[in-house]
Image (cartoon, coloured by chain):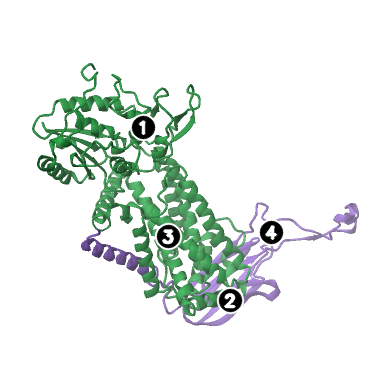
Amino acid sequence: MSLHDTLRGGAQSIFRRIEEAFDAPFGGTDNPMRHLGALGFYFLWIVTVSGLYLYTVLDTSIEGVHTSIGWLTEDQWYLGGILRSLHRYASDAFILMTMLHLIREWAYGRYHGFRLYSWVTGVPLLWLMFFSGIGGYWIVWDRLAQFSAIASTELLDWLPIFNDPSARNFLTPEAINDRFFTMLVFIHLGVPLMLILGLWAHVHRISRVDHFPARRLALGTLAALLLLALVQPAISDAPADLSVVATGLRLDWFILFLHPLTDATSPAFVWALLSGVTLLLFILPLLPHPKAEPVAVVNAANCNGCARCLADCPYAAVTMEAHPYKPGHKIAIVDADLCAGCGICAGSCPSSTPFRSQETLVTGIDMPQQPVNVLRRELEKKIAGLEGTTRIVVFGCDRGAAVHALAAPDTAVMSLMCTGMLPPAFVEYALRGGADGVLVTGCRTGGCEFRLGDQWTAERLTRRREPHLRANVPAQRLHFVAASVSDGEALATALEEFRTRIETQAADSDRPPPFRRRTLHHD
Amino acid sequence: MIKPSAIIGQVILYGAFAVFIGYFATSPKYHQIPEDVALIKLSISHLGDRECRKRTPEELEKLPRNMRAPLDCPRERSDITLQVDLDGQTVFDTVMHPTGIAKDGVATVYKRFEVKAGEHMLSVRMNDNLAKPGFKFVKEDKVNLKPAQVLVIDFNPDKGGLFFQ
């Protein structure tokens, strides 16, 4: 194992522990660690909305800018002051969430294959983010702005791009004039617009973008920032005075950390660091990584153009086009570059029902590495081999808690690439084929490796999403357990509790009628 | 229904989030220079001199009417030598080169010096034409620097050459 893999594995383990610890108070839907990207978007919206108000009341002249912001902060503290504080703190939170999102995606190995586009388009956004943030501090034109403007231009001047050092613009108080704000408007309005455009490109290739956190999480974080704005409102330093060095600065370390770093090292070091990190992020997908999974394959004869795979694909890899030989019908087309090979589409396909009588079950869209036909054959074989009074079939997920350890004479286990690839009809098929109960387990809520597998599975099994579980499957004979890789013991306990529940509560009368496929023993 | 323990956990974590953001948004305080130190900024942007030759009337006669400039000047500018002494010690000695591929742009320098606040003898010498020996521009003065004060050394031919501000 390479050093990179070791580092990544360690980081992944830390993230997983924190996420699972956060599941206790927040639950999966509201767990901030599982929705860092959505939180980043949310904080950016807060920054945008608060920024629009601040801009409308800003006097964009050298003399007026400090005074107008001061008026907002002190005289109109109840609106302008709070919005200014929200603007600042939400910017810091945006940067924090973005950096955590970046590290988390790296830790989980989400930077190559079908995720390459999102990864690569995300890297330039980091530059735009910091560029916007630094420019924002200049607008106040207080001592902190003065310090940042001088430090930034001194850093820029190390690059051989200007004939005249740009830091000369901040030599003396007379050197600054109102045209300074022409540049600031570009930096602090134009660059964030580019950032938003870049974010659109960043999420362009995934469907059902998690661009807004759950309501409780949104309200909770907003309340935290509002409280912070009231307890510690953002205020300006003394007006900028280029005849003195700005000292004792209340520095925003989230955004302006580069300035002290430059002072402690050198502009050459900082540029080497920035360009090195950027280059590393770009070449990361070129480093050795696991081979891509085979992509989904469409069978034209069995695809009826229902578009459920299009609706369920988490990566927008499926599109619908005119069927080649069924006039008026559509057919699913898989974009191999976008396909994650998760199998969620196979789970969504109505043709994946095991009740079909064909000896070889060919579905509309299937996974070459784990075809639905193989799943059916394996299930039939395992059910036939079950012994004991309470026979249970467990459908698990390769990315979640390991299910193979649960295998026993009275327990058949089937591990899928993602629980989302389980057609709900397989649950009924197992029960009608001889099982007394079916336990389905997948990743914890919000923790699906393929984004939506846990959600679709839960919705299909609770009959809120097509293809849904039929009504003749009794609730007491089906149990869903959200379990991550570290939840092996909890899953084993849940299985035993489920077995006890069936033995004590389930009535023979609620068992769905037996079903034996005609070709069952002819394979 | 959320359990009371989960509510308490959320309140603690949201509070920790606010404290983390609030603290690092303003703290720890940053001091770019020590309290008893002032800053001298040497920043000069100047077009070096060049040796021009006066054209003879015969030469001018041969030129088209619209190109009869009395002086024949090379495009290239001279390097500029610059020396800064502080309290009798040379603290900076450099040769500034003209910018541009044809070496016809301004020569620039930007340098910061941290000095103890108090009285200092500051001397700056500059020669913008190396074809001629010595220093064409000299500025020497006693300066009294307060803590955190910024003193700028600049050059402007309209202000008499080198000046302190």
Q: Which residue is mark 2?
A: A64
Residue located at (18% from left, 39% from top): A477
Q: Quadrant of the N terminus of chain A?
A: top left
* Distance of label 2 from label 1 (alpha carbons): 64 Å
Task: Report if the CB atoms under discs 4 and 2 are less than 8 Å apart.
Answer: no
Q: Quadrant of residue A496?
A: top left
Whether residue B49 is visible here, answered yes or no, is: yes
SS for dot 1: loop
* Distance of label 4 from label 2 (alpha carbons): 42 Å
Q: Which residue is mark 4?
A: B77
Chain A painted colour: green
Q: Give left or right: position of A51 versus A486.
A: right
Which amino acid type corresponds to the residue marked 1 in the rendered image? Cys
Q: Quadrant of residue A168?
A: bottom right
Q: Which residue is mark 3?
A: A43
Q: Which mark is residue B157?
A: none
SS for dot 2: helix
